[in-house]
Image (cartoon, rainbow, N blue to C red):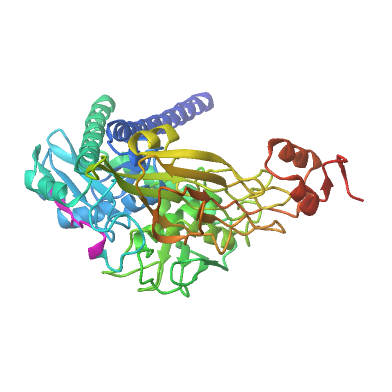
Amino acid sequence: MTADAQAASADDGLREADLAEIHRHIMWNRLVAVVEEQAQTLIRAAFSTAAREAGDVSAGVFDMRGRMIAQAVTGTPGHVNTMAAAVVHFLARFPADQMSDGDVFLTNDPWLGTGHLFDFTVVTPAFHGGRMVGLFASTTHVPDIGGRPAGPDAREIYEEGLRLPICRLQHRGQLDPTLLDIIRANVREPVQVVGDLMALVGCNDIGRRRLGEMLAEFGLDDLGNLAEYIFDSTARAMRAAIDRLPRRRYHSEMRIDGYEKPIDLRLELSVDAQGLLLDFTGTSAQSAFGINVTLCYTAAYASFGVKCALAPEVPNNAGSLGLVRVVAPLGSILNAQEPCAVTARHVIGQMLPDVVFGALAQAMPTAVPAEGTPLWLLVVSGETTDRDGATQRRFGMTSFHNGGTGARHELDGLSATSFPSGVKAVPVEIAETVTPLLFVRKELRADSGGPGRWRGGLGQVIQLRSLANQPFRFAAMLDRVVHPPRGRGGGGDGAAGVVRTTRRTLGSMGAHDIHPDEDLIIETPGGGGLGTPAQRDRELVIRDLREGYVSAAQAEAVYEFNPSLQQEKR
């Protein structure tokens, strides 16, 4: 063979390899589109505001070993990453050879699912050509699960509501009517809860149908080879990101409000040949109240913090998640043991990315933001009555409201933005439609962002009033009231949160009755600042003044800027 012929043959081989790589990426992207349609179907079909309006959901496809191949773009880390670990539990309870086409399985067990009873995870096997080729899973937060109303006040899981082990909801296309009757009989919102379950079933069904179409289009018999390619590609990319860190131990700690006493979160992050080890030894013991975190939820948000800082562009699947190991002592608040209460596990669990950032800041200081504020849930319930005092209807709603995120390098923090959960706030118009409550005020909270070269994001002020002339119940599950988000690199702390009415100060944990003659007022915390305030660009200070983000008093006291003179102090 001549040299020219050899070169041509090599070029042909290279082109063939390139085309094969492109083909695999097309199939990978198609799989992501399948699970995104799965998630969007769930949102469109859901009954409750948490899924329909806030997007508090997750969706994904798994291989025959229960490893997550792809997740939907839409979803929250607390659902996606716990679901990623949950499917293996389903396969342990119902091995693949016991699953049939048309079967559907579910659980809301906090230790096997997402960390509390309000989240249902539904798993559906997918068949193609007469044999099982994978599984689809989805999760959402339902509006009620019985027991005590949502809140941190319970002392045991038994008080918190209905707990279902991994069980079969549907067999060969036939729903289990007894199981649905049990659920209806134990919840306050049976129509919404069962409606959300049917949305979970329906979105998984869409996923398996679209997968069948994809396999037929690309001439695939199963997902095996594609899954291994995805896992291998992702793991290599994640490994490369980890290898940029020096192999040493990094430490971080954070004190937060807790319920009955403050809580210390402590982390040792180690880089080794296996990847990253996140060890929370030294963290406070589990609480007597319902703010405890199961290990699956701890791992979900701790690993999410790693991904955000270290490898945000790397896809989230078993390949990347497998390189991050998370451990916490048994009986600690991050590895709480049965039968402890866990309803408000998000209050603690969503602090973990900031704890991880504190460790990674020692190795990559320009890659992590200052501390921010996790979700501030507005969980309200009550009833309306007629003139004779008879109950007309009961209502309950979970609405998501947020404080400010921490400042980022070269960027201010985001105001009234959810991180790390990513859920959206329920629109005021929707909240006022499903409850007899009026939002009197909902606005950004001036001066709440931590000062710095880059300012922390602002919190918000929410004022709520009942139009029913009846008390309503507010279940407070809030933190960062005593210990606000900390600044970094010389930046100031964000403003602490405030919980009160027009007549009195309220505790940040526990149930409160809000009377007809008072309004509920929530002031969410601001994010921490980054860099010293003296370094902030004067034009940015002027902009903040113009927009009302900072007051004239703060501009002069913190940034040494006199608004009346439009010049710096000398």
Magenta segment main secondary structure = loop
Pick whichever, 535 or 494, lies toward us: 494
Pick whichever, 155 or 7, lies toward us: 155
Taking the magenta stretch, the answer to whether it contains residue 161 is yes
Name the residue rendered at 30%, 31% in the picture. Answer: 41
Give the number of marks.
0
In this view, 261 is above or below 451: below
Q: Position of residue 103 (x, y in %)?
A: 13, 42
**Residue 24 location, quadrant:** top left
In this view, 11 is above or below 283: above
Q: 23 left or right of 107?
A: right
Q: 271 left or right of 554?
A: left
**Residue numbers of the magenta segment:** 158-168
Name the residue rendered at 63%, 62% in the picture. Answer: 362
Q: Position of residue 376 (x, y in %)?
A: 46, 51
Name the residue rendered at 53%, 24% in the picture. Answer: 4
Q: Residue furthest front?
A: 388
Q: Position of residue 444 (x, y in %)?
A: 59, 42
Pick whichever, 99 or 161, lies toward us: 161
In this view, 381 is above or below 257: above
**Residue 534 visible in the current orientation:** no
**Residue 186 visible in the current orientation:** yes
